[in-house]
Structures are given as structure tokens and as C-alpha cells.
Image: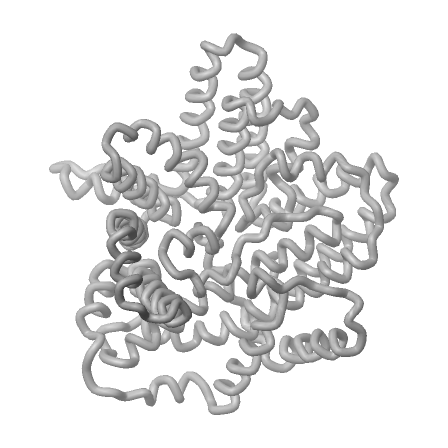
Amino acid sequence: MLFNTFGYFVFAITAFFVFLAAPGKWKRTVLLTASYFFYSFFGVKSALLLFSVSLVSFFFGITMRSVRSSRRIYYLWGAIFLHVATLVYFKYAEFIVMNVNYFLKEPLSPIHVIMPIGISFYIFQSLAYLFDIYLEKIQPEKHLGYFLLYLSFFPKLLQGPIERASQLIPQLKRGYVFNYNKIAEGVQLIIVGLVKKMVVADRLAFFVNEIFSDVVNFSGLVLVLASYIFTFQIYFDFSGYTDIARGLGKIFGIELSENFQAPYLATNIQEFWRKWHITFSAWLRDYLFTPLLSQFRNFGAWGVVGAVLITFAICGLWHGPAWGFVIFGLIHGAYMGTSILTLKKRNELWERSRVPAGWVRKWRIFVTFNMIALSFVFFRADSMKDAVYILTHLTGPVDLSILFQAYSAIEILSLIAAVALLAKSPGFAPAISINTNRGLSQQFYYGVMVNLLIFLGVKKYAPFIYFRF
């Protein structure tokens, strides 16, 4: 039961009407019940694991604030160990055993562990909560029901945003007030998210999957196009999920965090990570990079680079148990480290060149985007061998017949039209917001979007890319 399925929206609409009908003090109970009911569709064991992680965080949080300051660190490390061990077991155990076996004369027996969907997101959210208590940024939540809902709120449970307790829990405690405009905004965001996913991302996947599933049979411009198209596919797929999650949140009176702000218009890698998967980037910055930087402060600029490389290595590994993800993270760490070390010199060179600032900005966007597209080759390729093949076969005969086998001319024009419409929608660019009083023009706009969904949306089931993580 995923966001882009009919069953999910039957569930969400039913949950909303039950939520509306419930007395004020029972509304959050309805949301909590709905959230665990929803997650149980992915397995009762998954729901029990979420509940267990929630209990650990809840009780460790309360205990940390009830003991002497000098002893809090032990409780923090205890909670970190339990959460990280849980994540490692469910997400990386098979990968670890497989790689360790290369070095053993008597290999360990292979194991098979089913990873619960969304585990990376709710464990990172739990860790953020505990870190903030330890750092005395927040007080521990003493109401178990609110805390359980904080971790399990179903719109953001599977794929984020990774919400901070200081932002979400107060909203959960606030009384619900029916607001037509907020509901309208929520519905509009859901429509935009579905168009991003079902009209654009899922259709781009036709070509991407065809090429990446058998890269050795292609070369030259086809591989270049597949790499660029995947860069757009993952953006529309992931930001589409976020729009739907935020839209559902608004309907229930909850404002979830914005997770994307036109990331492909970034002028450098630092700016890209401030605009891409924003809540995850902020988590890495606050709870990993900043503590590492404190430890490496005596090493000057190289200490910053070291902290960046470690942070992005973990960023890559967070995405999953594959060397391609690790390389993806290290590439971005190298990008950012190099940018930090050369920023002053590059700025001086541009100043001396007397190139107009507007052209400098366009050039930086162009270079940054291409660096990102290059890194996504390792992210998407089925193996390191495939990634290396792609990068060593980017030149060759120009044969685009496979592109026109994947898409008709009408489909290509429809994709262009859909992207042009989305460029004017909320969530696509940071400066654009929804105004529910724009009258007929807005009704026409969202009417067109709904028709795109009906007539051009890919009806074949396609999970969101980030469900893997």
C-alpha cells in the first residue's frame, strides 16, 4: 500500500474522515492507530520493530534527563549502540557477511534478512531526538502516545522528511482546526507529487531501466542520455514523494519540512546539499559533520576536508549496502573538499576574468549539475563493473534508436509539457508558493494536472526509488 496506489488513497481518505469525526482529544489516537495500521501492511514484524525502537528512544530520552550530567553520555552511547546495531543488522548484515567471506578460508553461512521499509528514516529521526536531549536543545517527551506518533506519522514514515522533535511534536499536541485553505493546499501538493512520480519519473524510468539493466550493449550518447535522464528521474521521484507527504500532512493539520529547493540550480556542491534531501543533509551537518569538525579543529582546512570525507562516506553507506553508494558518497566528499580548498582561488580568478556575474552563475550551475550527474552513475548502476563500463564508454557511435523505441514523439512532447507545467508548481522552485485565491486560472492549472495523471500517468506499479533506503 504505497503512495502511488489506489488502495493507499482509499486508506488516507478513510483515515481523514475518521479523524474529522473523532472528538478533539481522540484525533491524535486516530492518527496513531492509522499510522501503525498502515505500516502493518508491510508486515506485523516491521510494525513491532518500529514500536520497539520508539520505546527505546522514549525511555532513554527520559532517563538521560533524570540522571547527573556526567552520566548522560553513557545513556546516549547506549541508545546509539542499540539503534545503530538494529540498523546494521537489518540493512547491512548480508553485505557484511558476503564481503567478509572473501577473506575467510571457511566462509560464514550466508544469511537473509528482510529490511523493513523506512528503517533508515525513523532510526535517524530517533537519534536526532536523543542527540537534542543530550545537547539540552529540547526536553524529553513524557507522553508515550505523542512520541509514538512523532516517529510513526504515516505520511513521512517511509521516506521522510526526517523531522526534528522540536518541529513536529508541538504540532501533534496542538488542537486541530479545520482549515479549507490548508486542505486545498494539501490536495494541490498531492496532485503535483503524483504528476512528478507517475507522469514524469515513472515514464523516464522506461529508458533508464532499459539501458542500465544491460549497459554492455550500449555506448556513446545513449549512455550519456541514460545518465542524465536518471538524474532527473530520481529528482522527480523523490521530490514527488515529499510533495505527497507534505500534502497529506497539511490535510491533517501538520506542516512537514520542505525537502527540496531547486537543487539542480545550485552553483556548487555545498549549495546542492543545502537544496537536496534537506532534512537528511541537515541531520548529517548537525549530528555528524559538526562533531567531527570539533575533533579535527586543530588541522585547519584539512581538518574540514577530513570531516567532510567521513561524513559523505557515511552518507553514501546510509543509502544501502553497496559499494556504488559508498563511492557516490566519497565522490561528493571529494567534490566538497576540493571546493573548500580552492574556493578562494576560484573566486579570485573569476574576478580577474571580468566575466559578467550572470554568466559566471550559469557556468557554475552547468558544471555543478554535470558533476552531480556523473556521481549518480555510481548511485544507479547495478554494479561497480557497470559503473566503470559506463564512464569508459561515453564516446562512440551515435545511435538513438533505443530512445525512440522507448518513447513515441507524443510521449516526448507530453513529458516536456508536464515538466514545463511542474516548473510553475509548488515544490519545484523555492520562490513559488500556493495561493488558493487565484480563481479560474488555478482551477484550470490543476485540472490540466489531473488530466495528465488520468491520461499520461503510468498505471503500472512502480515503487519509489528511496523505498530501498
Q: What's the coloring here?
A: one colour
Residue at (50%, 50%) from the top-left corner?
A: 278
Using the rendered view, name the quadrant where residue 2 is placed. Answer: bottom right
Q: Position of residue 125 (x, y in %)?
A: 53, 37
Q: Residue furthest bottom?
A: 409
Q: Is residue 275 left or right of residue 268?
A: right
> In terms of depth relative to the viewer, which is nearer, 17 or 334?
334
The residue located at (30%, 44%) in the rendering is 313
Is 146 left or right of 212, judged from the image as shown?
right
Front in this rendered view, residue 144 or 129: 129
Would you say 460 lies left or right of 205 here? Answer: right
Vertical arrangement, residue 14 with respect to residue 298, above or below: below
Q: As displayed, is residue 183 above or below residue 57?
A: below
Q: Is residue 111 visible?
A: no
Q: Which residue is rendered at x = 53% and y = 50% of the image?
A: 159
Q: Is residue 47 above or below residue 323?
A: above
Measuring from the top left, give residue 443's x and y in whole percent.
76, 75
Residue 222 is at least partly visible in this image: yes
Residue found farthest to the left = 105
Q: Which of the pair 169/38 is nearer the observer?
A: 169
Q: Quadrant of residue 291?
A: top left
Rendering coords of residue 359 (x, y %): 37, 72
Q: How many labels were placed on the picture?
A: 0
Which residue lies at the image location 56% right of the left edge and 64% below the top edge?
429
Q: Quadrant of residue 311?
A: top left
* Residue 92 percent coordinates (x, y): 35, 41
The quarter of the rendered structure image containing the N terminus is: bottom right
